[in-house]
């Protein structure tokens, strides 16, 4: 996993809008099947035949990478967390996000059906509880990201200190935007 982490950190340093992280699949008719025996590859028994393990990555580690990819898509690739993401990644993006990913899963036991207000709260709590980001810094970043998101479901942790502020539409400066548009807002 060391070389994967190094490659990921290099990609993050390039400041790309999105980094697609995914686990290899054996699609019908592709040549990957010729490597199955040599690399001890095991796949799901149904299409698209996702790689479950290899001679270099055991099943448990592969499942961690699958969760990492899913959470990366929800948090980083979504473009919803332009202020929080640098705090989440710190000086070691892969290690920090893997720590956060493991915490997300330990906290929720799921990778899908995470409501947007729950995601904002998970990012906030994860910053504080597992990445040791100062609470005020985390709150400012996540609150800013929430306002830019245009979301209508205000997370309880944001309402706690100032519920009247979130009762008005004026706090939501950007309407529902596409994933690509959110990346443009981040770069501006």
Image (spheres, helix red, strand yellow):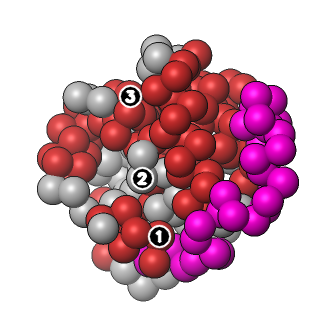
Looking at marks 3 and 1 on the same chain, the residue that comes earlier in the sequence is marked by 3
- How far is disc 1 from disc 2 in space, using C-alphas? 9 Å
Q: Nearer the viewer, residue 107 or 62?
A: 107
Q: Indicate left or right for 168 with 175 as reference.
A: right
Q: Residue 54: which numbered mark, if any?
A: none
- Residue at left offset 37%, top offset 80%: 30
Distance between mark 3 and mark 2 Cα atoms: 16 Å
- Reply yes or no: does residue 133 show up in magenta: no
- Sequence order check, earlier mark of 1 and 2: 2
For the record, the magenta segment spans 152-180
Q: Position of residue 97 (x, y in %)?
A: 42, 35
| Pointer 2 residue | 82
Residue bearing mark 3: 96
Please report the residue visible at 68 percent of the width from the left and 45 percent of the height from the top.
119
Helix, strand or loop status at disc 2: loop
Image quadrant in which the C terminus is located: bottom left
Name the secondary structure under disc 1: helix
Side (left or right) of 151 relative to 75 = right
Q: Are marks 1 and 2 in contact (CB under 8 Å)?
A: yes
161 is within the stretch colored magenta:
yes
Residue 26 appears in view: no
What residue would you read off at disc 1? Answer: 182
Task: Name the residue at 37% across, 62% down.
Answer: 186
Question: Disc 3 versus disc 1: distance between alpha carbons?
Answer: 23 Å
Mark 1 and mark 3 in contact (Cβ < 8 Å)? no
- Location of residue 48 in the rendering, given as x and y in whole percent from the top left corner: 57, 72
Classify 156 as above or below 148.
above
Locate residue 35: give its quadrant. bottom left
Quick one: SS at disc 3?
helix
Alpha-carbon neighbours of circle 2 within 10 Å: few (<14), some, or many (≥20)? many
Judge depth for marks 3 and 2 and give the one in front. 2
């Amino acid at each position: 996993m060391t070389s994967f982490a190094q490659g990921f950190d290099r990609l993050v340093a390039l400041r790309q809008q999105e980094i697609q992280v995914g686990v290899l699949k054996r699609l019908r008719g592709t040549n990957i099947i010729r490597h199955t025996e040599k690399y001890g590859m095991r796949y799901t028994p149904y299409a698209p035949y996702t790689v479950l393990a290899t001679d270099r990555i055991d099943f448990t580690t592969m499942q961690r990478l699958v969760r990492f990819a899913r959470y990366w898509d929800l948090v980083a690739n979504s473009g919803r967390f332009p202020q929080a993401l640098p705090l989440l990644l710190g000086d070691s993006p892969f290690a920090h996000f893997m720590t956060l990913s493991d915490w997300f899963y330990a906290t929720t036991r799921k990778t899908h059906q995470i409501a947007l207000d729950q995601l904002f709260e998970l990012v906030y709590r994860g910053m504080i509880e597992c990445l040791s980001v100062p609470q005020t810094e985390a709150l400012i970043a996540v609150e800013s990201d929430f306002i830019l998101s245009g979301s209508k479901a205000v997370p309880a942790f944001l309402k706690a200190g100032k519920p009247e502020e979130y009762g008005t539409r004026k706090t939501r400066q950007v309407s529902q935007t596409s994933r690509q548009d959110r990346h443009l807002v981040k770069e501006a």
